[in-house]
Image (spheres, grey):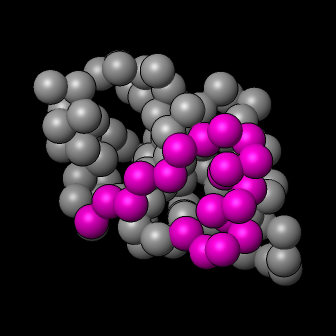
Amino acid sequence: MKIAIATEGRETSPLVSSKGRRSPYYLIFEDDNFLEAIKNPFISGSGGASYSVVYILSEKNIKKFMSGEVGKNMEEALKQRGIEFIKKDISPADKIIKEINK
């Protein structure tokens, strides 16, 4: 299963970002395997970031999305695309993946 984690950096151990739609990076994992880091092209700018980010994630076949927080629009967009949102405290992304795959 593919999981995306909103993070503050592109390595596998950065902290989870508290900003779901404006996170600097999204790390993509499948099971324990790190696949890629996606730089958020919507980190700044006007509205519509939630739907745009979720579209990118859905194109990558993401099934679960983890972040510190998401707003109402992003939560709705995730539901529409069948992506489960899991709220996570600020901790290293690689630690979260290990916990999930125990």
Q: Name the residue at 61% across, 74% down.
A: 71
Vertical placement of residue 41 versus 37, above or below = below
Q: Is residue 69 above or below residue 10?
A: below
Left or right, residue 23 beside residue 82? left
In this view, the residue farthest toward the bottom is 46
- Residues in magenta? 70-89
The quadrant in which residue 30 appears is top left
Q: Position of residue 14 (x, y in %)?
A: 31, 54
- At a point 41% along the width and 53% down the height, the residue shown is 86
Q: Is residue 87 left or right of residue 20?
A: left
In the foreground, 16 or 79: 79
State which quarter of the image contains the C terminus. top left
How far across and down, in percent of the image, does residue 33 sit? 35, 19
Q: Position of residue 25 (x, y in %)?
A: 53, 53
Residue 87's image quarter?
A: bottom left
Please say if 95 is above or below 2.
below
Left-right relation of 7 to 57: left
Residue 81 forms part of the magenta stretch: yes
Numbered-mark total: 0
- Picture quarter containing residue 18? bottom left
Residue 8 visible, this angle = no
Whether residue 6 is in magenta: the answer is no
Q: Is residue 79 left or right of residue 33?
A: right
Relative image position of residue 15 (x, y in whole percent)? 30, 59
Nearer-the-camera pick, 35 or 99: 99
Q: Residue at x 66, y 38 (%)?
A: 82
Q: Residue at x 22, y 59 (%)?
A: 91
Please tell me whether residue 85 is drawn above or below residue 71 in the rendered image: above
Residue 79 appears in view: yes
